[in-house]
Amino acid sequence: MPIAAANSLVARLSPPPIPSVIAWSREYTGGKGALIDLSQAVPGYPAHPEMLRLLGEAAASQAMTGYGPIEGEAVLRTAYARHVSELYGAPVGAENVHITSGCNQAFMCAAIALAGAGETVALTNPFYFNHDTTLAMLGIKRALVVCDAANGFLPDLASTEQALAAGARVLAIVTPNNPTGAIYPPALLHDLFLLCRKYGAWLILDETYRDFLAEGYGPPHALLSEPGWEETLVLLYSFSKSFCIPGHRLGAITAGPKLLAEITKVMDNMQICAPRSAQHAVAEALPVLATWRAGNRLEIARRADALKAVIAELPGWDIAAIGAYFAFIRHPFADQPSTVVAERLAKQAGIISIPGAYFGEGQERYLRLAFANADTASIGLLGERLR
Protein backbone atom coordinates (compact mmCIF):
# COMPACT_ATOMS: atom_id res chain seq x y z
CA MET A 1 0.00 0.00 0.00
CA PRO A 2 1.45 3.41 -0.94
CA ILE A 3 2.34 5.70 1.94
CA ALA A 4 0.90 9.22 1.97
CA ALA A 5 3.63 11.85 1.97
CA ALA A 6 3.89 15.57 2.61
CA ASN A 7 4.59 18.07 -0.16
CA SER A 8 8.22 17.42 -1.04
CA LEU A 9 8.91 21.14 -1.44
CA VAL A 10 7.90 21.69 2.19
CA ALA A 11 9.46 18.49 3.49
CA ARG A 12 12.86 19.59 2.17
CA LEU A 13 12.81 22.77 4.26
CA SER A 14 14.75 22.93 7.52
CA PRO A 15 12.75 23.40 10.74
CA PRO A 16 11.94 27.05 11.61
CA PRO A 17 15.22 28.74 12.65
CA ILE A 18 14.09 30.74 15.70
CA PRO A 19 12.69 27.79 17.69
CA SER A 20 15.87 25.82 16.96
CA VAL A 21 18.15 28.42 18.56
CA ILE A 22 15.73 29.00 21.45
CA ALA A 23 15.93 25.26 22.11
CA TRP A 24 19.72 25.54 22.62
CA SER A 25 19.16 28.13 25.34
CA ARG A 26 17.07 25.69 27.39
CA GLU A 27 20.30 23.95 28.34
CA TYR A 28 21.76 27.16 29.77
CA THR A 29 22.08 26.79 33.53
CA GLY A 30 22.15 30.52 34.34
CA GLY A 31 25.75 30.62 35.51
CA LYS A 32 26.48 33.86 33.65
CA GLY A 33 23.26 35.60 34.63
CA ALA A 34 19.93 36.06 32.87
CA LEU A 35 19.52 34.99 29.24
CA ILE A 36 20.22 37.70 26.68
CA ASP A 37 17.97 36.96 23.71
CA LEU A 38 19.32 38.53 20.52
CA SER A 39 17.64 36.07 18.17
CA GLN A 40 14.21 37.08 16.90
CA ALA A 41 13.62 40.73 16.02
CA VAL A 42 11.18 41.66 18.79
CA PRO A 43 10.92 45.22 20.15
CA GLY A 44 12.79 45.36 23.44
CA TYR A 45 10.30 47.75 25.03
CA PRO A 46 6.51 47.57 25.47
CA ALA A 47 3.79 48.98 23.27
CA HIS A 48 2.54 52.44 24.19
CA PRO A 49 -0.45 52.42 26.61
CA GLU A 50 -2.50 54.32 24.01
CA MET A 51 -1.78 51.57 21.49
CA LEU A 52 -3.05 48.99 23.95
CA ARG A 53 -6.15 51.07 24.66
CA LEU A 54 -6.93 51.41 20.97
CA LEU A 55 -6.43 47.69 20.40
CA GLY A 56 -8.69 46.79 23.30
CA GLU A 57 -11.38 49.21 22.22
CA ALA A 58 -11.37 47.91 18.66
CA ALA A 59 -11.27 44.26 19.73
CA ALA A 60 -14.36 44.79 21.90
CA SER A 61 -16.38 46.13 18.98
CA GLN A 62 -19.02 43.84 17.50
CA ALA A 63 -18.36 45.51 14.14
CA MET A 64 -14.88 43.95 14.05
CA THR A 65 -16.10 40.35 14.28
CA GLY A 66 -17.13 39.98 10.64
CA TYR A 67 -15.04 39.68 7.49
CA GLY A 68 -13.49 42.90 6.24
CA PRO A 69 -12.37 44.11 2.81
CA ILE A 70 -9.74 41.86 1.26
CA GLU A 71 -7.55 44.87 0.46
CA GLY A 72 -7.70 46.07 4.06
CA GLU A 73 -9.78 48.55 6.02
CA ALA A 74 -10.23 51.82 4.18
CA VAL A 75 -9.34 53.80 7.29
CA LEU A 76 -5.88 52.20 7.54
CA ARG A 77 -5.21 52.18 3.80
CA THR A 78 -5.95 55.91 3.73
CA ALA A 79 -3.94 56.70 6.86
CA TYR A 80 -0.94 54.66 5.72
CA ALA A 81 -1.03 56.15 2.21
CA ARG A 82 -0.94 59.61 3.78
CA HIS A 83 1.98 58.55 5.97
CA VAL A 84 3.96 57.19 3.01
CA SER A 85 3.19 60.31 0.95
CA GLU A 86 4.51 62.55 3.72
CA LEU A 87 7.61 60.41 4.27
CA TYR A 88 8.61 60.27 0.61
CA GLY A 89 7.18 63.54 -0.64
CA ALA A 90 5.35 61.71 -3.42
CA PRO A 91 1.67 61.13 -4.17
CA VAL A 92 0.46 57.75 -2.84
CA GLY A 93 -3.23 56.97 -2.44
CA ALA A 94 -5.28 54.32 -0.70
CA GLU A 95 -5.57 52.58 -4.07
CA ASN A 96 -1.81 51.90 -3.81
CA VAL A 97 -2.07 50.12 -0.45
CA HIS A 98 -2.98 46.55 0.46
CA ILE A 99 -2.97 45.47 4.12
CA THR A 100 -1.69 42.01 5.05
CA SER A 101 -1.29 39.89 8.15
CA GLY A 102 2.36 40.76 8.74
CA CYS A 103 5.20 41.49 6.35
CA ASN A 104 6.05 37.82 5.78
CA GLN A 105 2.58 37.42 4.33
CA ALA A 106 3.11 40.58 2.29
CA PHE A 107 6.18 38.99 0.74
CA MET A 108 4.40 35.71 0.06
CA CYS A 109 1.48 37.48 -1.60
CA ALA A 110 3.83 39.53 -3.76
CA ALA A 111 5.97 36.52 -4.66
CA ILE A 112 2.95 34.46 -5.74
CA ALA A 113 1.56 37.35 -7.76
CA LEU A 114 4.87 38.02 -9.53
CA ALA A 115 6.53 34.64 -10.10
CA GLY A 116 5.34 31.13 -10.81
CA ALA A 117 6.80 27.72 -10.06
CA GLY A 118 9.98 27.20 -12.06
CA GLU A 119 10.58 30.93 -12.52
CA THR A 120 13.37 32.81 -10.74
CA VAL A 121 13.52 35.46 -8.02
CA ALA A 122 16.88 37.03 -7.13
CA LEU A 123 17.76 37.45 -3.45
CA THR A 124 20.83 38.99 -1.89
CA ASN A 125 23.43 36.77 -0.25
CA PRO A 126 23.12 36.85 2.73
CA PHE A 127 19.32 36.75 2.57
CA TYR A 128 16.42 36.86 5.03
CA PHE A 129 15.70 33.17 5.56
CA ASN A 130 11.91 33.47 5.40
CA HIS A 131 12.16 34.96 1.93
CA ASP A 132 14.31 32.03 0.84
CA THR A 133 12.02 29.36 2.31
CA THR A 134 8.91 31.06 0.94
CA LEU A 135 10.30 30.79 -2.58
CA ALA A 136 11.42 27.19 -2.00
CA MET A 137 8.02 25.99 -0.84
CA LEU A 138 6.38 27.66 -3.86
CA GLY A 139 8.75 25.95 -6.30
CA ILE A 140 10.24 29.30 -7.33
CA LYS A 141 13.94 29.19 -8.21
CA ARG A 142 16.42 31.40 -6.42
CA ALA A 143 19.30 33.39 -7.85
CA LEU A 144 21.81 34.98 -5.49
CA VAL A 145 23.23 38.50 -5.75
CA VAL A 146 26.69 39.00 -4.29
CA CYS A 147 26.89 41.25 -1.22
CA ASP A 148 30.54 41.35 -0.23
CA ALA A 149 31.55 42.10 3.36
CA ALA A 150 34.33 44.33 2.03
CA ASN A 151 31.61 46.50 0.46
CA GLY A 152 29.49 46.67 3.59
CA PHE A 153 27.21 43.84 2.38
CA LEU A 154 25.68 46.11 -0.26
CA PRO A 155 24.37 44.41 -3.43
CA ASP A 156 26.88 44.28 -6.26
CA LEU A 157 25.41 45.89 -9.37
CA ALA A 158 27.25 43.62 -11.81
CA SER A 159 26.03 40.54 -9.96
CA THR A 160 22.50 41.97 -9.89
CA GLU A 161 22.53 42.61 -13.63
CA GLN A 162 23.82 39.10 -14.25
CA ALA A 163 20.86 37.62 -12.35
CA LEU A 164 18.35 39.81 -14.15
CA ALA A 165 19.90 39.19 -17.56
CA ALA A 166 19.66 35.44 -16.87
CA GLY A 167 15.91 35.78 -16.49
CA ALA A 168 15.07 36.59 -12.87
CA ARG A 169 11.55 38.04 -12.85
CA VAL A 170 11.99 39.73 -9.47
CA LEU A 171 14.77 41.22 -7.36
CA ALA A 172 13.87 41.11 -3.65
CA ILE A 173 15.92 43.20 -1.21
CA VAL A 174 15.64 44.33 2.42
CA THR A 175 16.90 47.68 3.70
CA PRO A 176 17.79 48.34 6.44
CA ASN A 177 18.92 44.80 5.88
CA ASN A 178 18.00 41.62 7.64
CA PRO A 179 20.36 39.96 8.57
CA THR A 180 23.28 42.37 8.22
CA GLY A 181 21.79 45.71 9.22
CA ALA A 182 23.34 47.28 6.10
CA ILE A 183 21.54 50.40 4.91
CA TYR A 184 21.32 50.73 1.13
CA PRO A 185 21.98 54.35 0.05
CA PRO A 186 19.30 56.08 -2.06
CA ALA A 187 21.63 56.16 -5.08
CA LEU A 188 22.13 52.40 -4.94
CA LEU A 189 18.39 51.80 -4.66
CA HIS A 190 17.89 54.00 -7.70
CA ASP A 191 20.47 51.98 -9.64
CA LEU A 192 18.78 48.71 -8.65
CA PHE A 193 15.40 50.13 -9.69
CA LEU A 194 16.77 51.14 -13.09
CA LEU A 195 18.30 47.70 -13.60
CA CYS A 196 14.96 46.05 -12.87
CA ARG A 197 13.23 48.42 -15.27
CA LYS A 198 15.86 47.71 -17.94
CA TYR A 199 15.15 43.98 -17.82
CA GLY A 200 11.40 44.18 -17.28
CA ALA A 201 11.72 42.77 -13.76
CA TRP A 202 10.04 43.74 -10.50
CA LEU A 203 11.82 45.22 -7.49
CA ILE A 204 10.42 44.09 -4.14
CA LEU A 205 11.79 46.42 -1.48
CA ASP A 206 11.14 45.24 2.08
CA GLU A 207 11.25 48.28 4.38
CA THR A 208 10.29 46.58 7.63
CA TYR A 209 13.00 48.47 9.56
CA ARG A 210 12.91 51.86 7.84
CA ASP A 211 11.51 53.62 10.93
CA PHE A 212 14.80 52.92 12.72
CA LEU A 213 17.09 54.76 10.36
CA ALA A 214 19.21 57.36 12.12
CA GLU A 215 17.55 60.62 13.07
CA GLY A 216 17.80 63.07 10.21
CA TYR A 217 18.51 60.38 7.60
CA GLY A 218 15.71 61.69 5.39
CA PRO A 219 13.62 59.67 2.92
CA PRO A 220 15.21 56.24 2.32
CA HIS A 221 14.86 56.74 -1.44
CA ALA A 222 13.06 58.72 -4.14
CA LEU A 223 11.65 55.77 -6.09
CA LEU A 224 8.02 56.78 -5.57
CA SER A 225 8.80 59.95 -7.54
CA GLU A 226 9.96 57.94 -10.57
CA PRO A 227 7.47 58.18 -13.46
CA GLY A 228 5.68 54.86 -13.85
CA TRP A 229 7.08 53.40 -10.62
CA GLU A 230 3.93 51.26 -10.36
CA GLU A 231 5.19 49.07 -13.22
CA THR A 232 8.40 48.10 -11.40
CA LEU A 233 8.30 48.76 -7.65
CA VAL A 234 6.65 46.91 -4.75
CA LEU A 235 7.23 48.23 -1.22
CA LEU A 236 6.67 46.03 1.83
CA TYR A 237 6.26 47.25 5.40
CA SER A 238 5.57 45.92 8.89
CA PHE A 239 3.70 47.70 11.67
CA SER A 240 5.03 45.15 14.17
CA LYS A 241 8.34 46.77 15.05
CA SER A 242 7.34 50.44 15.08
CA PHE A 243 4.22 49.88 17.18
CA CYS A 244 5.53 46.90 19.20
CA ILE A 245 2.65 44.65 18.16
CA PRO A 246 4.18 41.65 16.34
CA GLY A 247 1.55 39.35 17.82
CA HIS A 248 -1.21 41.26 16.05
CA ARG A 249 0.33 40.51 12.61
CA LEU A 250 -0.07 43.58 10.46
CA GLY A 251 1.86 44.55 7.32
CA ALA A 252 1.37 46.54 4.14
CA ILE A 253 2.12 46.41 0.43
CA THR A 254 2.50 49.61 -1.59
CA ALA A 255 2.22 49.05 -5.34
CA GLY A 256 0.30 49.98 -8.45
CA PRO A 257 -3.45 49.24 -8.58
CA LYS A 258 -2.99 46.69 -11.40
CA LEU A 259 -0.62 44.58 -9.35
CA LEU A 260 -2.70 44.98 -6.19
CA ALA A 261 -5.65 43.52 -8.09
CA GLU A 262 -3.57 40.37 -8.59
CA ILE A 263 -2.45 40.38 -4.96
CA THR A 264 -6.09 40.62 -3.88
CA LYS A 265 -6.73 37.29 -5.61
CA VAL A 266 -3.86 35.74 -3.66
CA MET A 267 -5.00 37.23 -0.34
CA ASP A 268 -8.57 36.03 -0.85
CA ASN A 269 -7.29 32.47 -1.04
CA MET A 270 -4.78 32.86 1.78
CA GLN A 271 -6.54 34.74 4.58
CA ILE A 272 -9.38 36.83 3.11
CA CYS A 273 -8.47 39.82 5.27
CA ALA A 274 -5.90 40.92 7.82
CA PRO A 275 -7.00 41.25 11.49
CA ARG A 276 -9.58 44.01 11.52
CA SER A 277 -9.32 45.38 15.05
CA ALA A 278 -5.56 45.90 14.74
CA GLN A 279 -6.09 47.76 11.47
CA HIS A 280 -8.47 50.25 13.07
CA ALA A 281 -6.23 50.70 16.11
CA VAL A 282 -3.11 51.36 14.02
CA ALA A 283 -4.99 53.78 11.76
CA GLU A 284 -5.64 55.96 14.80
CA ALA A 285 -2.18 55.42 16.28
CA LEU A 286 -0.20 56.39 13.17
CA PRO A 287 -0.43 60.16 13.72
CA VAL A 288 -0.97 60.07 17.48
CA LEU A 289 2.15 58.07 18.35
CA ALA A 290 4.57 59.77 15.95
CA THR A 291 6.59 61.39 18.75
CA TRP A 292 6.77 58.13 20.69
CA ARG A 293 8.04 56.28 17.61
CA ALA A 294 10.69 58.95 17.07
CA GLY A 295 11.87 58.45 20.65
CA ASN A 296 12.15 54.72 20.04
CA ARG A 297 14.38 55.41 17.05
CA LEU A 298 16.77 57.24 19.37
CA GLU A 299 16.67 54.39 21.88
CA ILE A 300 17.57 51.84 19.20
CA ALA A 301 20.48 54.08 18.16
CA ARG A 302 21.72 54.07 21.76
CA ARG A 303 21.60 50.27 21.76
CA ALA A 304 23.61 50.16 18.54
CA ASP A 305 26.23 52.45 20.08
CA ALA A 306 26.36 50.25 23.19
CA LEU A 307 27.02 47.17 21.04
CA LYS A 308 29.74 48.94 19.06
CA ALA A 309 31.48 49.88 22.30
CA VAL A 310 31.35 46.30 23.60
CA ILE A 311 32.63 44.66 20.42
CA ALA A 312 35.43 47.22 20.06
CA GLU A 313 36.92 45.87 23.31
CA LEU A 314 36.84 42.21 22.25
CA PRO A 315 39.89 40.92 20.36
CA GLY A 316 38.91 38.73 17.43
CA TRP A 317 35.31 39.93 17.28
CA ASP A 318 34.28 42.48 14.67
CA ILE A 319 31.12 44.24 13.52
CA ALA A 320 30.94 43.56 9.80
CA ALA A 321 27.75 45.61 9.39
CA ILE A 322 25.20 47.24 11.69
CA GLY A 323 22.03 49.28 11.31
CA ALA A 324 18.41 49.56 12.46
CA TYR A 325 17.73 46.30 14.34
CA PHE A 326 20.68 44.06 13.49
CA ALA A 327 24.41 43.62 13.60
CA PHE A 328 26.28 41.01 11.58
CA ILE A 329 29.16 40.02 13.82
CA ARG A 330 32.31 38.27 12.64
CA HIS A 331 33.32 35.73 15.29
CA PRO A 332 36.92 34.66 15.92
CA PHE A 333 36.45 30.89 15.55
CA ALA A 334 37.54 30.39 11.95
CA ASP A 335 37.60 26.61 12.16
CA GLN A 336 34.09 26.24 13.59
CA PRO A 337 30.71 26.40 11.82
CA SER A 338 28.51 29.28 12.89
CA THR A 339 25.91 26.82 14.20
CA VAL A 340 28.47 25.38 16.61
CA VAL A 341 29.48 28.86 17.79
CA ALA A 342 25.88 30.00 18.28
CA GLU A 343 24.93 26.79 20.08
CA ARG A 344 27.86 27.12 22.46
CA LEU A 345 27.05 30.76 23.20
CA ALA A 346 23.45 29.86 23.98
CA LYS A 347 24.28 26.90 26.22
CA GLN A 348 27.35 28.26 27.98
CA ALA A 349 27.08 32.05 27.90
CA GLY A 350 23.32 32.57 27.83
CA ILE A 351 23.47 34.60 24.59
CA ILE A 352 20.94 33.64 21.92
CA SER A 353 22.00 34.60 18.39
CA ILE A 354 21.37 33.34 14.87
CA PRO A 355 24.14 31.49 12.99
CA GLY A 356 25.30 33.13 9.79
CA ALA A 357 24.80 29.85 7.93
CA TYR A 358 21.03 30.31 8.26
CA PHE A 359 21.28 33.30 5.92
CA GLY A 360 23.02 31.74 2.95
CA GLU A 361 26.21 30.38 1.51
CA GLY A 362 29.57 31.59 2.76
CA GLN A 363 28.26 33.12 6.00
CA GLU A 364 29.86 30.70 8.50
CA ARG A 365 32.08 33.38 10.07
CA TYR A 366 29.10 35.48 11.15
CA LEU A 367 26.37 35.66 13.78
CA ARG A 368 23.30 37.87 13.59
CA LEU A 369 22.60 39.83 16.75
CA ALA A 370 19.19 41.51 17.02
CA PHE A 371 20.54 44.14 19.40
CA ALA A 372 17.26 46.06 19.42
CA ASN A 373 15.82 43.29 21.61
CA ALA A 374 17.99 44.18 24.61
CA ASP A 375 18.44 47.34 26.67
CA THR A 376 21.84 49.00 26.92
CA ALA A 377 22.54 47.45 30.34
CA SER A 378 22.05 43.94 28.97
CA ILE A 379 24.16 44.74 25.92
CA GLY A 380 26.90 45.91 28.27
CA LEU A 381 27.03 42.41 29.77
CA LEU A 382 27.97 40.84 26.43
CA GLY A 383 31.64 41.79 26.76
CA GLU A 384 32.30 39.61 29.78
CA ARG A 385 30.37 36.69 28.33
CA LEU A 386 32.10 36.76 24.95
CA ARG A 387 35.64 36.88 26.34
Image (spheres, rainbow, N blue to C red):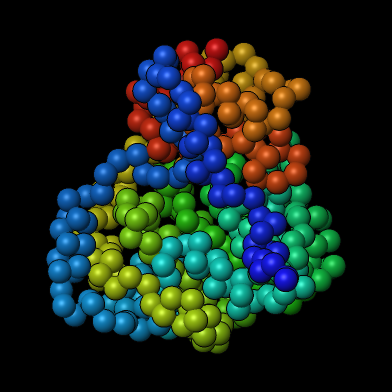
| Residue at (49, 81) in percent of width and height | 269
Q: Judge whether residue 190 can be spotted in this image.
A: no
Vertical arrangement, residue 149 with respect to residue 157, above or below: above
Left or right of 298 in this view: 50: left
Residue 159 location in percent, x, y?
80, 55
Look at the image and tell me in which quarter the N terminus lies. bottom right
Residue 200 location in percent, x, y?
74, 77
Of residues 67 and 2, which is closer to you in this image? 2
Residue 241 location in percent, x, y?
38, 51
Q: Judge whether residue 126 can be spotted in this image.
A: yes
Quarter of the view holding residue 122: bottom right
Quarter of the view holding residue 64: bottom left
| Residue at (57, 37) in percent of width and height | 354
| Residue at (46, 51) in percent of width and height | 209
Of residues 316 and 367, which is closer to you in this image? 367
| Residue at (45, 45) in percent of width and height | 41
Left or right of 58 in this view: 357: right
Task: Give the number of marks.
Answer: 0
Quarter of the view holding residue 195: bottom right
Left or right of 161 in this view: 220: left
Of residues 118 and 198, which is closer to you in this image? 118
Left or right of 288 in this view: 332: right
